Amino acid sequence: MRDRRVHFVLLMLLVLGVTVVFGAAQARAVTFTRHDYSAGSAPCGLAIGDFNGDGFADVATDNAWTTNASVLLGAGDGSLAAPVTSSVYGNPFGMAAGDLNGDGKKDLVVVSQSGSVRVLLGAGDGTFTSAGDFAAGTIPLEVAIADFNGDGKPDLAVTNDQAASVSILLGKGDGTFEDKVDYATGAAPYGVAAADFNGDGNIDLAVACSDSSVVSILLGAGDGTFGAKTDVAAGNGALFVDVGDFNGDGDKDLAVADFFGDTVTTLMGAGDGTFSAGAVYASDSGPGGLAVGDLDGDGVQDLVVVARNADKADIYLGNGDGSFADKVVLATGGYPYNVGVADFDGNGKPDFVTVNDSGSTVSVFLNAGSMPAGTMTLDADNDATKSTTVTIDSSVTSAAQMRVRDGGGDWSDWQAYAAHTGWTVPAGDGSKAVDVEYRSHLGDVLALNDSIILDTVAPVSGTGDAPTGWVNASGLPLTVVIGSSDASTYVVSTEYRLDGATDWTEGSSVPVSGDGTHTIEYRSTDAAGNVEVAKTYTVGIDTAPPVTTDDAPSGWLKAAALPVTVHLTADAGLGSPIKSTEYRLDGASDWTDGASVPVSGNGVHAIDYRSTDAAGNVEDTKTCTVRIDAVRPTTSGQAVTVKRGKKAVFKVKVTDKVSGNPPQTVTIKVRNAKGKLLKTLSGFGPVTSNATTSLGWPNCKLAKGTYRYVVYATDAAGNRQSKAGGNRLVVK
């Protein structure tokens, strides 16, 4: 039979104060491998225990169609032997295992829907003999074994579907039981769980009632009796119930499989026997058997629920705060009726087993562990660090602990898993490898590693072949390129500030323009974050040539002014300093460095000069002239005859050996025979040198007679004649 009755009514779950949870998936996982074994026909009940005393978990089922119980002995490696059957009677349904006669061997109690329970005493070798049948209520379904009266002897609690009650059968300690005592429950009681819900040391009961969709709580008095029920709302069709501490507060909580609502409901215990609504989690169709266990080994209780109509097992991993992650779904055999948790392969990891009604099989799901999975990097996956203290950044699921070592070194102690953990690598620049192992609560280990370069030395930057000093227009446009290198890692940025700017500009090419001196501060940063101490580069731009002036005297120089030196003065203005001044004297082919030009020798001297600044700007050639005349002129004149009162014309000649130097002034003085000065004629000039020049005296009023005139001359240099010449003047 599938269930004690079949419901096809779809009901909407409207339970006050209960939240339906569909999300909040957690980043944890656990893996199971399924192995199927033949059982009796239509198995429905399930009990787990060590029935042959070999220390390995065995499985017992009762089989609805063959009215017997099957025992499948575990080999300790996860496998089960072929079933060995023991006879029962009358539609067997639920079952439980315990030492009912105190001989240290596991016994079985099997519920028959005919109205009783049968006790099968274990021989300790996996076989059983009947100790008799004991009356229960109408259509009993499930049974729980516990000590209700504190006498150290196992008692029974049996749910009675049609009687809406639970029967208490107190054990005598020899495998037999007192007559039942019934206590009222909600309608159609099904699953039952026994635990101390109010902390008084006495065993209480929680009964899932499918028709009333409640869990009936019956508090034990410790003498085998129970108080009146208190009903706590559950989901639609509450079928199975199990006990756990889901929020870690030390108080017993309940998980309920709601067959018709396709949900799993949690009820949170207050520790005083009362319960409040927890949450409701969606399940696959027809949730039936339910079991509690720490499936992923994280110290938090999880749930496994079989979904009968879907042929599935839904696993809900606990978060430790009373909530559960989204279900993980595994396929089972046909119509899984019940489920239990145990370690079948001895690896310390909880496995679970389902009994599959339509397939007549038992499915063992071996826990392959919760292998941690994820990634690890150092310092947020940076390539380098300048500190020996690095951060291990972990994103690993199912990790409970971790340990660390330098590559190939000694491991640290195991410590609690943390997403960010500090670690000190050995000193000394270079690549540093770090190994990390992550261990799950179940002992599975994931090994990861990463490396990072320790770099404590800043990069080195320079301006390479950038011009030093000054550049002129031929060097423009000017871009200074900053080159940089790093011994251990690489340069991630170069930045500069030009001409005292406040902010840094990122880049390694610096455009520079405008006449004047320019200063560039620059520095580089490497992958480890080492920042170079700023360096300074200075360059000058000067596009204007210098201006040179001379102090060459104007006019002619005579001997008294000698020697003469012409001084050349170069002015750089706001540009680069003067590098050199040079000159050429009197058409020389080569330039001579110097700013002082000595000039000597009669004649006209030409000085070409120019200056060059530090930027290489060459001034256009300039020219100045120096005239030197250290020779006195001489004069002469021809005889002159003139009528009194008429114009006298003097034909004179001024001789000057310096070519091209005309006299500045000529004066003629007329004397009588006795030498007395009679007339001075001045204002003549300029007179061409070395040529006869006619000079007129417009109105000669001298008395008739013979006179003598003398010619006086001063040249442009100021030299007066060395010898004054003249001749006679005849007036008629």
Image (cartoon, grey):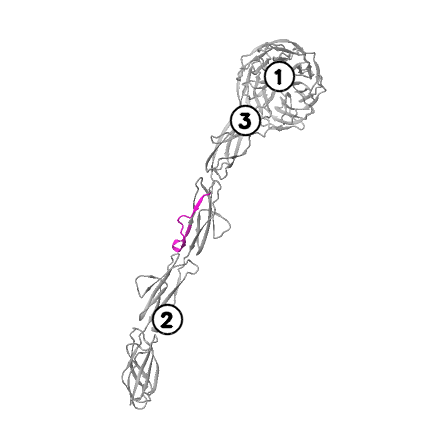
Position of residue 58 measured from the top left corner of the image (x, y, whole percent): 57, 15
Amino acid, disc 2: Ser
Indicate the secondary structure of the residue bearing disc 1.
loop
Q: Is residue 426 left or right of residue 41?
A: left
- Residue at the spot of label 3: 440
Residue 537 position (above or below residue 323): below
Which comes before the other along the chain, label 3 or label 1?
1
The extreme bottom residue here reads: 704
Q: Quadrant of the N terminus?
A: top right
476 magenta-colored: yes
Q: Is residue 233 visible?
A: yes
Amino acid at circle 1: Asp
Give the spatial CA distance, label 1 vs label 2. 137 Å
Circle 2: element type: loop
Residue 305 picture quarter: top right
Between 363 and 516, the residue placed more toward the observer is 516
Q: Nearer the viewer, mark 3 or mark 1?
A: 3
| Farthest residue, direction right | 228
Q: Position of residue 621 (x, y in %)?
A: 35, 63
Q: Is residue 651 left or right of residue 576?
A: left
In the rendered image, which quarter is residue 591 located in? bottom left
Q: CA distance from mark 3 to mark 1?
A: 39 Å
* Neighbour tally class for label 1: few under 14, some 14-19, many 20 plus, Cα within 10 Å: few
Above or below, 436 against 102 in this view is below
The magenta stretch is 458-479
Q: Is residue 558 visible?
A: no
Q: Which residue is identified by label 2? A: 554
Q: Which residue is label 1 attached to?
A: 3
* Amino acid under disc 3: Ser
Query: Mark 1 touching mark 2, by CB under 8 A?
Result: no
**Where is residue 158 shown, x and y percent of the image?**
66, 15
Residue 616 lies left or right of residue 135; in this view the side is left
